[in-house]
Image (cartoon, grey):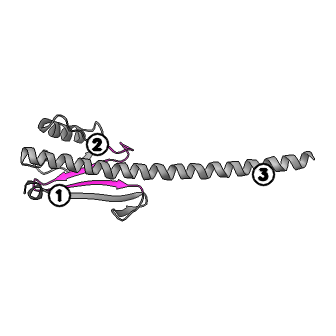
Amino acid sequence: MIAITLTGCSQQFKEIKQNTKQAKNEINDLSIESRDAKRVADANILNTTIQLYILDAETLPTIKDTDGNFKSLKLINNSSDFKQFEKLIKNNDPSMSIPTDPLDPDRYFEYYSDGKTYTIKTYLEQKNTNCTQTKPGYCEFVIEGNIDTVLN
């Protein structure tokens, strides 16, 4: 009788362990989906911020390197790129804020402008129809725009 009880407990323990593992995987999947949804929403917020900047300043926010070339920015919270970009945006409108990736600093938004066009990039964790898989766990989501479209 004791052996039967221990076998039953062992089986229940295995089932509980398997259910816990399955629940953790489901929570992780939801977390990935919610982080990706936040990335897309924040990329659109960043796009709106840039468009408002263009409407106010009649130019694109750009930063150049020491050689005078337009610089691609990695918008990692508190990085020099982030601080330069945030300062540029806030000098135009102090109420604006720059979003950061939910997994910052491991993941971040990228911004590039040549003064006429701009590109915002982020990398989603799951592939969907709105992004291009670059490697497992990195699906490139891109928003592109240009100053003429915004001003006209």
Q: Which residue is mark 2?
A: 99
Q: Earlier in the sequence, mark 2 or mark 3?
A: 3
Mark 3 packing: few (<14 Cα in 10 Å), some, or many (20+)?
few
Q: Which residue is mark 1?
A: 145
Amino acid type, residue under disc 2 in the picture: Pro
Determine the residue positioned at 41% across, 55% down. 125
> Given the current orientation, which residue lies at the most extreme top position?
94
Q: Earlier in the sequence, mark 1 or mark 2?
A: 2
Q: Can residue 114 be seen?
A: yes
- What is the number of the mark on residue 11? 3
Q: Position of residue 42 (x, y in %)?
A: 30, 47
Amino acid type, residue under disc 3 in the picture: Gln
The correct choice, above or below, for 129 with respect to 17 in the image is below
Image quadrant where one finds the C terminus: bottom left
Q: Earlier in the sequence, mark 3 or mark 1?
A: 3
Q: CA distance from mark 3 to mark 1?
A: 59 Å
Determine the residue positioned at 79% across, 48% down. 10
Give the secondary structure at mark 1: strand
Q: Is residue 122 left or right of residue 16?
A: left
The correct choice, above or below, for 134 with respect to 42 in the image is below
Q: Position of residue 121 (x, y in %)?
A: 27, 54
Q: CA distance from mark 2 to mark 3?
A: 48 Å
Q: Is residue 120 left or right of residue 51?
A: right
